[in-house]
């Protein structure tokens, strides 16, 4: 028996030994060996901590990138039990407005509403491109004034004089519902009033929040269900926001706090700097109830400095994103699997959760990041291309795509993101990212729940019924890993076929 015990102990490597050999490993470089299953898949709990004081139902965070997270993504992520971090590649006023918009919603849906004032006319049928096909008429022609009427596509098409003022033919004083109605309350209201759509209006200020149709309700009901939504102490969706480390970001921070941001992320490609340490101390002194997440870091020494400064969470990753060229341009960074393990091993001692930021291409990468010590994963390209990501769909080579760019690309830097790379005062701008495109992924409300189910199956194979259980199994050396050769990585994917169609769900 003792000889067999010895043989079993040599089956694979404990994480501590594997990650102490001087190699920088990515997620694809390593593989976990299966453990013992004694529970069903659905009993796996993915609830976790984003930071010291904020809990999430699922370990998912959308990245603060201007082609990933604005209002629609933030609403969807919170509704699923995760959180979206609003990017800061805009003015403080605009960033705060996005936060207020996201927090004003109760259902995972944001439409592109067209507003007109009573004296306006409608120039073409193209103005009815949003769903539902209607235009709202308010006193000022913006959402920030009283709702006066509504014009449907069919109303406009029936007009003889297409240049007539909307006040001449709009449906006046349309029925509206309170913006704090949840999905089922909106559905009941539509059914009771026999309406195709209804504007949702904030009862406090009269501002139009959104327009929801019966078709929207049916579509949302058809998506898979996840855990509890992420709600703040104010009873609204939790929304995060990124800021930089410049003096002007202190003023931006004030805007964000007033808008209701639940957490701030200090957005820097290399977070171990005097600028970030000073900003952490400022945030914790000025807003002691507000959690602040520092980063990015990839080493234990970097993490120690920010933990000592008072961070409530750490963002881990440098050069691992699909559109990031930091490792190529600057020769600095670390393989993401190694970075996550090393930083989490030190952060765990202080009770500081870490976010594995970058390098996520599939559900297996999410499993690896979480088991190696992360509490959440931050995703950019994985969510870009979804309905909820900013931007319009285009067609490229017969494929439906959306634009996706790194915040280190020259294009993004021209809008202000160069401060993230400490290059805003430099005369010469050096790109650390590219501009690209990603395929249409459909709605986050559909593909993220399926990926979370895949993550649960991965945890079951490892014998881990929760993130806490997975971390303990790794630390106790029960879970074992091996490095995969290039051939093993090929073997682990689809191979040997003339052609195939890959559908995950």
Image (spheres, grey):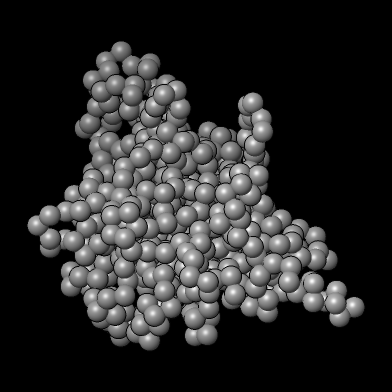
Which of the 4 image quarters holds residue 284?
Answer: bottom left
Given residues 475 and 7, the one toward you in this image is 7
Q: Give the quadrant of the N terminus.
A: bottom right
Instruction: Name above or below for residue 313 compared with residue 392.
Output: below
Q: How far across and down, in percent of the image, does residue 196 sit? A: 53, 33
User: Total marks drawn?
Assistant: 0
Which residue: 69% across, 67% down? 12
Which residue: 61% across, 47% down? 487
Q: Say whether residue 487 is left or right of residue 36.
A: left
Q: How far across and down, in percent of the image, does residue 328 sit? A: 32, 54
Q: Say whether residue 361 is left or right of residue 11.
A: left
Which residue: 42% across, 64% down? 334
Q: Give the quadrant of the C terminus.
A: top right
Given residues 487 and 305, the one toward you in this image is 487
View extreme (left): residue: 427
Q: How far across and down, in percent of the image, does residue 420 sit? A: 26, 62
């Amino acid at each position: 028996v003792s000889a067999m015990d010895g043989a079993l102990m040599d089956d694979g490597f404990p994480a501590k030994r594997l990650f102490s050999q001087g190699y920088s490993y990515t997620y694809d470089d390593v593989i976990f060996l299966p453990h013992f299953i004694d529970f069903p898949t659905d009993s796996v709990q993915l609830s976790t901590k984003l930071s010291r004081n904020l809990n999430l139902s699922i370990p998912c965070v959308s990245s603060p990138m201007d082609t990933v997270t604005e209002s629609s993504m933030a609403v969807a992520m919170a509704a699923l039990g995760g959180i979206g971090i609003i990017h800061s590649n805009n003015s403080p006023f605009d960033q705060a407005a996005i936060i207020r918009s996201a927090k004003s919603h109760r259902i995972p849906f944001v439409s592109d509403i067209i507003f007109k004032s009573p004296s306006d006319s409608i120039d073409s049928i193209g103005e009815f491109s949003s769903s539902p096909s209607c235009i709202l008429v308010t006193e000022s022609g913006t959402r920030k004034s009283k709702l006066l009427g509504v014009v449907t596509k069919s109303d406009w098409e029936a007009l003889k004089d297409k240049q007539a003022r909307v006040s001449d033919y709009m449906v006046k004083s349309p029925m509206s519902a309170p913006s704090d109605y949840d999905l089922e309350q909106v559905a009941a209201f539509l059914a009771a009033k026999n309406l195709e759509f209804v504007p949702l209006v904030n009862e406090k200020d009269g501002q139009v929040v959104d327009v929801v149709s019966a078709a929207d309700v049916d579509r949302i009901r058809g998506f898979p269900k996840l855990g509890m939504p992420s709600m703040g102490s104010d009873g609204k969706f939790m929304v995060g926001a990124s800021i930089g480390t410049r003096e002007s970001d202190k003023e931006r921070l004030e805007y964000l706090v007033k808008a209701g941001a639940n957490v701030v992320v200090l957005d820097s490609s290399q977070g171990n700097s005097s600028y970030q340490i000073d900003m952490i101390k400022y945030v914790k002194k000025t807003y002691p109830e507000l959690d602040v997440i520092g980063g990015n870091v990839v080493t234990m020494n970097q993490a120690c400095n920010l933990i000592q400064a008072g961070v409530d969470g750490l963002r881990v990753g440098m050069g691992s994103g699909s559109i990031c060229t930091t490792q190529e341009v600057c020769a600095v960074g670390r393989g993401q699997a190694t970075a996550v393990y090393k930083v989490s091993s030190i952060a765990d001692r202080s009770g500081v959760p870490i976010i594995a930021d970058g390098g996520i291409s599939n559900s297996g990468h999410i499993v690896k990041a979480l088991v190696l010590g992360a509490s959440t994963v931050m995703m950019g390209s994985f969510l870009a291309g979804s309905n909820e990501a900013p931007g319009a769909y285009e067609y490229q080579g017969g494929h439906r795509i959306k634009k996706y760019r790194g915040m280190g690309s020259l294009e993004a830097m021209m809008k202000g993101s160069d401060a993230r790379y400490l290059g805003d005062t430099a005369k010469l701008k050096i790109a650390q990212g590219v501009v690209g495109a990603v395929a249409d992924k459909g709605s986050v409300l559909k593909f993220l729940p399926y990926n979370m189910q895949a993550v649960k199956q991965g945890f079951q194979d490892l014998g881990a019924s929760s993130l806490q259980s997975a971390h303990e199994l790794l630390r106790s050396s029960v879970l074992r890993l091996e490095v995969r050769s290039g051939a093993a990585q090929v073997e682990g994917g689809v191979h040997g076929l003339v052609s195939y169609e890959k559908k995950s769900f």
